[in-house]
Image (cartoon, rainbow, N blue to C red):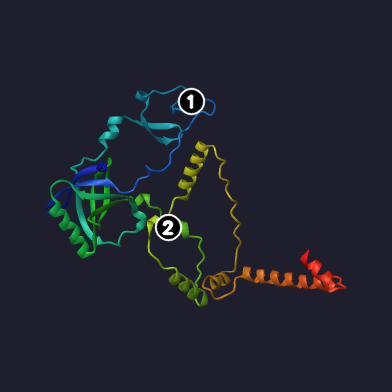
Amino acid sequence: MVAPRANWKGFIKFGEVAFPVALYTAASTSERIAFHTLNRKTGNRVRREFVDGETGDPVERDDQVKGFEIEDGRYVVLEAEEVAAAIPESDKTLKVEAFIPCDEVDDVYFDKPYYLAPDTMGSDAFKLLRDGMKKAKVAAIARTVLFRRLRTLLIRPHGKGLVGSTLNFDYEVRSSEKAFEEMPDLKIEGEMLELAKHIINTKKGEFEPKQFDDRYEAAVAELVKAKIEGRSLPKKKAAPAAKPNDLLQALRESAGMATPAKTKRTAANVNAGKSRQKAARASAPKSSSPGGARQRRAG
């Protein structure tokens, strides 16, 4: 098996202790099914081309520059070397600025996870930092220039190594107040709250990532396989429309404290069926002989 290639190599420094580390991608979408855009008529791949928005003429790569729009139709042009000059200088060092409780950072700030492993020398110092954080139950806040930007990482012990999650900048995280501003100020208590707690307790479990499959990916893979083999394509079943229900009744049914309404209707239908059968037998003509009756039953 080919060893993964490091995305970044540098040093971690806490206090006056520094040691080399390598950073590897922890989550990737490269295994997902990818499509190409084709010309329906020829079956050839379609090539993307940049054209002038006004003239429609193709624009070659050497004539393409970055521009920041200052108002409608007016831009500030930035050359490639000018953009490169804005990239912060890097000394390839993750400087630990503070150790904080592991649960102090809100999850909405988490961006991408990376594995941090010792690179050649310095494994003793690496283990010291890892085990020290485990014992103190803390995470490290560190900063370095990563992928052209000065990034903040939350570093935590993870198995035999460390995991560093890049954090979103504060201006990138939207306030939750806007999302929740129209929520009514309701207080849930009494039986409804107790039923909800009961259902939650009966549904407690553990997080097992392998149990959660990517159904879309699997469906697309099956679709491609069916097309290759010339089989009929699977048809999507229409999902039943959701109906609003009584919250308290739904909670009682979920907790097993009430007979579901569907069961009641089924029982009613069964009783109605029995009544119809009795009425049919009562109105049917009676046989004049036992033999005739046996013949009708047999037929």
Task: Tell me, for residue 54, which label it has, or none.
Answer: 1
* Mark 2, residue position: 176
Q: Is residue 77 left or right of residue 265?
A: left
Q: Which amino acid, mark 1? A: Glu
- Circle 2: element type: helix
Q: Residues within 10 Å of mark 1 (few under 14, many from 20)?
A: few
Q: Residues within 10 Å of mark 2 (few under 14, many from 20)?
A: few
- Circle 1: element type: loop
Residue at the extreme front: 291
Quadrant of image for the N terminus: top left
Q: Which amino acid, mark 2? A: Ser
* Residue 17 percent location from the top left of the image: 12, 53
Residue plotted at (60% across, 71% down): 260
Residue plotted at (15% across, 58% down): 128
Asked if the residue under mark 2 is in contact with the one under mark 1, i.e. CB atoms within 8 Å, the reply is: no
Q: Is residue 57 above or below residue 121?
A: above
* Residue 123 percent location from the top left of the image: 14, 52
Lower position in the chain sequence, tag 1 or tag 2 = 1
Q: Is residue 199 above or below residue 175?
A: below
Q: Is residue 235 above or below residue 278?
A: above
Looking at the picture, tell me which residue is in the foreground, 152 or 73.
152
Residue at the extreme bottom: 190
* Residue 104 percent location from the top left of the image: 30, 62
Numbered-mark total: 2
Looking at the picture, tell me which residue is in the foreground, 32 or 144.
32
Separation of residues labelled 1 and 2 (CA atoms): 41 Å
Quadrant of image for the C terminus: bottom right
